[in-house]
Image (cartoon, grey):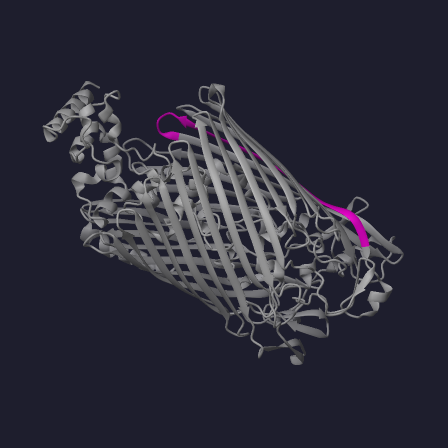
Amino acid sequence: MKLKNFDCIVAALAALVVCAGAASAQQAATYVGSDTCVACHSEQAAAYNKSLHGKTIPLVKKIAADKACETCHGAGSLHAAAAGDKTNPGFATIKNPAKQKGSDASAVCFTCHNQKKVMLWDTGTHAAKGLTCNTCHSVHNGNGSKNLKKDVNALCYDCHKGKKAEMSLPSHHPLQEGKMTCTGCHNPHGGALGNLNGETVNETCYKCHSDKAGPYAHEHAPVAENCGNCHKPHGSANQNLLKQAQPYLCLRCHKSEHSVPVMPSSRSGFSNKVLDLVKRNCYDCHKDIHGSDSSAGFGH
Amino acid sequence: MRILIAMLMMAATASPLMAQDLSADATLNALVKQTDGNQGLVQEYTKQDGTFKVGSVGFNAAATGAKTYLNVSAAGLGSGEESGELSLNMGTLAIKASENTMYHRQPYIKTGMIANGTFYINTNEKITDDRWNNGKYNTANVMDESFKRTESDMSVSYTCPKTGDYSMHVGQWEEKENGDAATKSSGKVMQTYVDRSHKLLDLGFDAKLGDHGAVAYDYTQGSFSDDAAGVLISTTASFYWQKAKAPAFRMDMHGLAFRSQPLKGYSVTGSVMSRTREALVSGYKMGSYTATLGAAHRFGEKLAVTVKGYGRTETITENDNFWFMNSVKNSIPSSTKQGETSQPDKTNFTGEFMAKYDLSDKLGFSLGYKLDHNYNRHAGTEIFTASQTYIDGGYVAANTQYNEFARKSTKNIYTAGANIRLPMDAELGLGYKAVRANKAMFESLPTTSDEYNADFYMPIKGSLSFIGSAMAMNGKNEKSNHTNSNDHQNSYLAGLEWNNEKYNAGANYAFDQTSSHSDAYYAGYSPWGAAYVVTNPPVRVLGELYQYKNDTIGLHASAKLGSECVLMGDSSYTRSLAKSPVLINFADGYVTDTEPSDIRMVNSGLNLKYSPKGKNLSADLGVRRAQWNDKLNSENSGWVNSASLSLSTKF
């Protein structure tokens, strides 16, 4: 502990030397170099150096190694000169993106990150709710190539707890089996429509369910409009992630259709009653319900 | 597998050349499974079954140098369900590749029904002989169908070395699905083939514009093909229909997005995108344009405001020259028909306003408004009924559209929320969402809905904490009295979590109940003859109730046993109950009935991890049991027990 304090004092002195003649907190801070930062923040520096972020970003973005810390945290002379004294006005001149709000926080990350998938972040749903990059990412201690604080799904479930429960229902996408992540459909950085990867619900689904994309010579209007009209993508008690079981699901729009086959039956013979089930599911005959090139009734 | 091999070769070549620091670990897995019953549901996403025994290998290797970073990992090698990932970064050049394989079971799910308290399986669902399978798979086991899905992704990006502000990338994503699936037509159950491929080629760049802006552009070309052999599906023994393949298509997409932060605390974003998708056989073509524009501003520390606009048009260009075979009878086309020539073209505009106000560290509010306007050109001209149909006490002529697809629909969506920090570090979140629409896009959708939700978190004592949430939603289509459709949902969730240095334990419970009421019209007509229109007018049953209830309980715990062992356990139990209305047709009249469904799922496991100090070896011994229990129809039930041993070593 004593050694750490000693390091801080040394760092502060070094900063004072660097800033000689300009030690007043009223003046703008200047760059002091990473060695000064590491003197007090050695744990953060060690973790950063090990991470993919630390190894690649300075190389790609032409950031000199001695400016790595101050690229994100801003010039540190006044902060270092405060030597840990929080009452010193210079202490607060350092930027801490983890505590910044709104676009101030994202602006730090956008210094380097220009990819298309993060372009709409500032006006996205997560940003509008007050989340920042640091809500999910840890620059110093994150895991894997994305510097995430946890596995993707576990991270999302922290807030979206109801979705985790839905994913354990009988019909579900293979998230709990580890074959898929939430980002397979969602762009947490904000998409054109909500937080979806595609510009519509359907275009999001079509990436994997491309056999449903068409365009068909006969479109089924609710299918072409929104897959969510019939499906619950996060999980369902019904087969194929359907909102309701057939024939009820279909009959909510299709009035006066032939949901029950007309055939002789009798109340006394349950085996005959069971016979009615042959055509109970609309899909049994209307196989191409997602669209067809050969039948307006989607029958074949 | 090709990409996986390429990744391994690349890693093997690159790592010794560049590495100053190498680290690697390898894992040898042994797995034994014991199964019984229908595996289609209990193991929906894996093919490992029966008395399955497999040894597989996995590894993770990292090589770091002064200017390079390489990480390559693979799992499940030798099991048939491999996955791998490679990340190679050499400063301005970065290569990423991954491949994942998965089996998706597509079994035949038998149906049945309850009558007088007894479950009767549908014995009329016949597993067909080889005639229905083109003579190819006459020994097909339709209870055990599956296809293999392989997803591979590879991208290369290059950053301009001078400034680091400009990058370009090229990538390929591919999905292949190959195997079989069970299918059913009019009671005949048979095997159908799956052989699909979807490929996306992507080329793009991004650039930083000054200190506060950036722009990115992407061009994506996609192609999809369905190469599965045709299957003949029958409705009667003498009438054959060929199952249609999914249409092959070509897709082209251009996307441009930008952002700018011209002033501190003020951001502007926008995007434009065009997409075309052309079905290669029919010649039908979808073209769409999408544009977004948004702005966000933070007024000091307390108030943040976001406004967004989203507009999209989608047009279907029909091919008047496309005619198709109506049906195939004994391989002879019985007639031809033209595709629809006036498909709905859609236009959607959404305007959104969101505000967040933090009154203090302990109290914050949010407000939102969204206008969602849809216009569907040609909607309502589409023919849904080919025969005369009896509806609401009258007849709708043949070839007349009735199942309404709204031409214009405008939704107003209002949201409000509050976040409150309570004494004892407890947190409470409250939310309300109201939807008011002038017309539902479809009959079953609500024009009015109200949704309430609450989230609660409280640290109870020391390392013990409680979370809880509740949600209630009521929706109704108030603009149509054809079906008087309405929906209700209630869900609750509660959890306890306890942690200390040696032990961790948690329990959670979730309940979800969804119900809807709708008038249903049954048995209106038969497609096989207009006579039924007259003799068999539809039966309107008021307020048919559909309902399902789900309970999910989860438990997990872990304990450090000394300094070298960790024991972990987890268990989840789901009970899923559903009631679905049907109408049964007896010779002497109709009877309304409810078909129940009762599924219980259990998944429990125990793992012991042993990592001896000072050794580069570790072991993980695990046992797991998963059970899918259909309480009404045991034909769908199955279970699997598995034992696994993984040995890992570090190099």
Residues B386 and B65: in front is B386
Q: Is residue B122 left or right of residue B532?
A: left
Q: Position of residue A197 (x, y in %)?
A: 45, 52
The span picked out in magenta is: B540-565
Q: Position of residue A8 (x, y in %)?
A: 18, 24
Is residue A153 highlighted in magenta? no
Residues B477 and B16: in front is B477
Q: Is residue B206 left or right of residue B501?
A: left
> How many numbered marks are there?
0
Residue ID at (45%, 51%): A184
Residue B140 seen from this side: no
Location of the N terminus of chain B by quadrant is: bottom left
Res. B549 image quadrant? top right
Does A69 appear above or below A3?
below
Dominant secondary-structure state across the stretch colored magenta:
strand
Does B488 appear above or below B9?
above
Q: Position of residue B336 (x, y in %)?
A: 65, 79
Residue extending farthest to the right is B588
Location of the C terminus of chain B by quadrant is: top left
Q: Position of residue B143 (x, y in %)?
A: 61, 57
Does B373 appear above or below B498?
below
Residues A114 and B203: in front is A114
Residue ID at (35%, 39%): B265
Residue extending farthest to the bottom is B332
